[in-house]
Image (spheres, coloured by chain):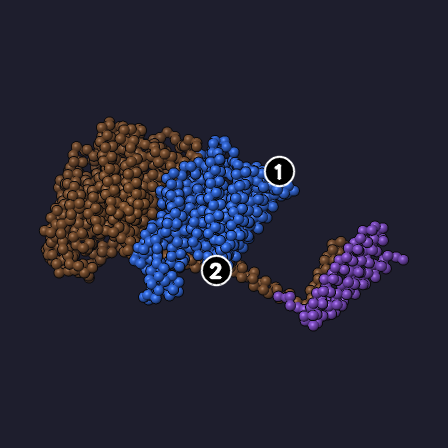
Chain colours: A purple, B brown, C blue
Amino acid sequence: MSPTYYLLLSALLFAIGAVGVLVRRNAIVVFMCIELMLNAVNLTLVTFSRINGQLDGQVMAFFVMVVAAAEVVVGLAIIMSIFRTRRTASVDDANLLKY
Amino acid sequence: MNAPLNVLVAAAETTSELPHVGPATGMASLAWLLFVLPAAGALVLFVAGRAANKWGHWLGVLTVVASFALGLAIFLETVGLPAEERTREISLFDWIAVAGLHVDFGLRLDPLSLTFVLLITGVGSLIHIYSTGYMGHDPGRRRFFAQLNLFVAAMLVLVLGNNFVMLYLGWEGVGLASYLLIGFYQDRPSAATAAKKAFLMNRVGDVGLAIAIFLLWTNLGTVQYTEVFENIGTLDAGVLIAITVLLLLGACGKSGQFPLQAWLPDAMEGPTPVSALIHAATMVTAGVYLIARTHPIYDLTTTGRLVVALVGVVTLLIGAIIGCAYDDIKKVLAYSTVSQIGYMFLAVGLGPAGYALGIFHLLTHGFFKAGLFLGAGSVMHAMNDDVDMRRYGGLARYMPITFITFGLGYLALIGFPFLSGYFSKDAIIEAAFAEPGWQGWAFGGAATLAAGLTAFYMTRLVLMTFFGEKRWEKLKSADGRDYHPHESPISMTAPMIVLALGSIGAGFLLSNGHVLIDWLAPSLGELEEHAAGGALPHEIVPWIVVGFSALGVLIALLVVGGRPTPVERPEPVSLPVRAARRDLYANAINEALIARPGVWLSRALVYVDNRGVDGVVNGTAAMLGGSSGRLRRLQTGFVRSYALSMLGGTVLVVAALLAVRFA
Amino acid sequence: MLLLILLVLPLVGALVVAPLKNNAATAKLVALAFALASLVLTAVTWFSYSIAEGAPRFQLELSVPWIPAFGTSFALGVDGIALVMLALIAVLVPIVMGFSWEEKLPEGRTAAGFFSLLLATQGLLVGVFAATDVFLFYVFFEAMLVPMYFMIGRFGGPRRQYAAVKFFLYSLFGGLIMLASVIGLYVVSGAELGQATFTWVELQRMAASVDETTQIWLFIGFFVAFAIKAPLVPFHTWLPDAGAEAPVGAGVLLVGVLDKVGTFGFLRYCLPLFPLASQRLAPLVLTLAVIGILYGALLAVGQSDMKRFVSYTSIAHFGFIALGIFAFSSQAFAGATLYMVNHGISTGMLFIVVGLVIARGGSRLIADYGGVHKVAPLLAGTFLVAGLSSLALPGTNSFISEFLVLVGSYPRQPVYTILATVGIIFAALYVLWVYQRTMQGPLRGSAVLGALEPAGGPGAMIDPDVAAKKAGTGFPDLSGREIAVLTPLIVLVLVLGFFPGPVLDVITPSVMATLHEVGLPDPVGGLSQ
């Protein structure tokens, strides 16, 4: 099976994730879309690792996973606390940090 | 440092014979004490503060008298030397030394400087003594003597220095002393203004002197008199004229000559002993000293000398004309001083035929004018410090000593035969008439006319003060007291008597057998005898001058003595009198051309600086602030719009990368 | 080593003093002790410096590699020009401390903070003058802004925030442009010398071979920074604000020493490192200098605020210094260098006296004073001495420097020199006029009368705001402490006026070396090519 399909799949996943971040308001969903994009990138990394016969890409993928895990911890905590104070999870309502 | 590099020590060619300069030995090696003594006196009086209030004035007198004694000793020692060894120098220390520039803190003892030393310390001592009486009850007595001592020290530095920078030190030093003393009565706004005016107009002159020094340095690489005079012949005519005119500007500032004469009458705001010492006998004659001292430069340029003589002639006329119109006794004397210094400038402007005559008149003038001022001070002392002669009258009987000494000074000033002014002024007018061409007629004629005017205004002054009706009997002074004229104490009359003796005898003693002229010859060169071909032969000049003076006296007797003097100034007066009362509009011109535009300019610039220059700076800051205020509106707070712009940015970057790659 | 101690000692002092917030008396004594120790050390430095013929240009050198990758080293060393500046700082700081001893500080500020900042400024200024590595110089040049910023911003007058920010931004702006030039110089040195370096001596060695266009660009970077710091017209507008709002003690250091970094920079960096550019652009700088002399003087005449007045007189004086530096002769250089010292003394004194007047009257406006000589004759007398020194009366220190600048400039630049000489008339005008308005005449003005009248007294002519603040406090003459602060300055004014020899001897070899580095002969006397 040609690796190109994996690359196409990851591009597709990344695009879905990007569109999701842009169009969805619910912070949780936005968050999940970001995770989707990260994992699309992971898939690309692993694919290239396979194509080039080197392990670097896989190592990078592990790094990304660790970062994503850390991000989830912090990000979900922030979303939770915003929801507690403002009773909403919409990113459009969390707009205090502006000019 | 390196030895001075005289770039232009080419074959030195000077017309006048320069004296040999030797080292100072004997008494002369103590010459530095001459100015250190009064300077130390001034310092002690300033620093000791109130502790010195009781004895301060005596310290002041003591230091100046000691300085006079030392000056006399050096003078006598110098007289004992052969003429060619009388010019000596002492170098005390290197004052300013950078690379090739060497300014010596050094003294030059020669007949010219010693003459001035005796005049300054001699008249200075007399006036210090006089001041112990005159200022006896003034709360600022200690300060007064400190400043007077400072003046004597600075004036001695001026005449003793052996280079132009030392001269400049003394020059501005006397300016400072004069500033302090004119403004001595600091409570009076008029005194403060007059002091400031004197300092500023002097500074205008000082700029000229300073630029002349720069020119000498640029062209000769030195500022020492000896080296400058040796090499001055190597300069071309243009530079020489520039130097002489600039030096003259300095001299005009200090000596109250046209066009910088307006400060001197205002300077009469100072206590009268100050007017006598600084603004009559010594400081204001510094300009004459400067020109005489730098005569090797003036020797080389007739144009430069002509300018000096013209300035002198214009000033002696201005002074004499304005002197006729004033009612303030000190201002009349002040304008008389302006006029008499004009004579001295005329004399030194005549070149080798007149340098010594200028100094001669300077000395005799020092005696009689100081005497006249002290007399005026004595009168004011008796008249509750009032200076308006219209309130005087008939004082001769109440203050006989003042009257007699003042009268002798008066006669000397108007050139009464065989008193001192007769010899000195007459010699100048003779020399002026001896000039060839139009200059002889113009200079001599103007000087003669001014002699007549001098006789008129001085006679008017004496008549209004000492003779006639006792106008003060019915009046009260400004502070509401009655007038009780009385003779002044001995400390005041004694100096007046000494100066009066000088007014009688100095002229004859100094001119008899060319004593002074021969004595000064090593410094000023031999006096050139009158060449034939002048405007008028010198035999008939004295008759003409005495005739004009007699005419002046006669007119004054008829006009002033012949009818009662009104106490109030007659107001609607003829145009010339009105002009003279307003100083021939000198102050108005200064005001309109310099003072008022200057203030406007200053105010305008303050506005420009605050609004314009600083406005640009603050405007830039405001613009940055304003535009960032607008730009920050882009931060809407909608996370998704941020995400969109990030996406857009990424797409742009990728597109750019691809475009570069495949282009 | 001596220089390192001289640099570190005040900084240590600043750290020691800063925590003593609750004990003002101890803090002040400790700070003064550090300042006096610095003074002693500076005296030792002064006498260790050799002025013998053939003595090296930089002495007491110390060099430690700092960031070898960039070719920077922590290099210190002094020549005559830097040494006199170090001496000036060492003398002024204890005097400023003495003056600030009883200064009323704004709410919530402590003497410990102020004295600590004074010491910090002192240490960093020593670094600026003693650095012989261009990068190190740059670091100190920027760092010294910080304590001065806090002194103005925390301890100053009513508009202190505005003035402090303006001062900081202006200086930073110049500093950043200079940074570009510093880096450019580093790059050029890589091409010229094969090994890029920041060492001043190395950079000077290559100066002659750099082409003129490059020199001009690099020169401009340094010049803008120094012209702002000096300040030359038209970069001057921060000074009146900073000078007026700064507490008097900081103002003395600001105008007396910190601004001299600009003129010092011209002489140490612009001229030797960019000789061709300096000569090419000299007419421009001279024009700015002469404009500064006349413009500053005219503005000083028109000021109504005493502290702004002092600032504007300084702008005029800086014009003289710049004139001397860009006239290229030993005499003018020596005059300009001496002028930096003398200006620190005389303007420092003027600032202090003005500060004393303001402390008594509670107003900065000239119009609020009059006839002070009647109630405080000593104060009026010292005001006059400071003023006379400011107008360069012969016999005072400033005359020597002004004379040297003018006499040294004339041979090469007669027109500019004549215009500058006219400036001395204005100098007399602005000094004497302010003296007349504030000190002479009858007692008058809200501040004076307000201070003398008992509270609620007859005050028809008195501005009620001013009067209410000072009512009945009296207008005392100088106290013992104030006399002690002013006496050393007066002594310096007179002694340097008659015996400038020792200082000139230190300066002369270095300025002659500078002239040699510019590559020009003395127009009259002195160096020949």
For label 1, the SS is helix
Dot 1 surroundings within 10 Å: few (below 14), some, or many (20 or more)? Answer: few
Dot 2 and dot 1 residues touching (CB under 8 Å): no
Give coordinates of residue A16: x percent, y percent.
79, 65
Instruction: From the viewer's side, name the closer residue of B4 and B553.
Output: B4
Question: Left or right: where does residue B515 sit relative to residue C247?
Answer: left
| Image quarter of the N terminus of chain C | top right
| Numbered label attached to residue B643 | none
Residue identifier under label 1 = C193
Residue identifier under label 2 = C107
For label 2, the SS is loop
Picture residue at 74% right of the left edge, 62% below the top: A73
Picture residue at 22% right of the left edge, 57% below the top: B578
Question: Left or right: where does residue B99 sit relative to residue A92?
Answer: left
Question: Left or right: where does residue B266 sit relative to residue A49?
Answer: left
The chain identifier of the residue carrying mark 2 reads C
Give the answer, above or below, for where C371 lies relative to C504.
below
> Mark 2: which amino acid?
Glu
**From the viewer's perspective, is the residue at label 2 or at label 1 nearer?**
2
Give coordinates of residue B516: x percent, y percent.
20, 34
The chain identifier of the residue carrying mark 1 reads C
Dot 2 surroundings within 10 Å: few (below 14), some, or many (20 or more)? Answer: few
Q: Is the same chain shared between marks 2 and 1?
A: yes
> Can you see residue B11?
yes
Give coordinates of residue C474: x percent, y percent.
35, 58
Dot placed on the residue nearer the N-terminal end, 2 or 1: 2
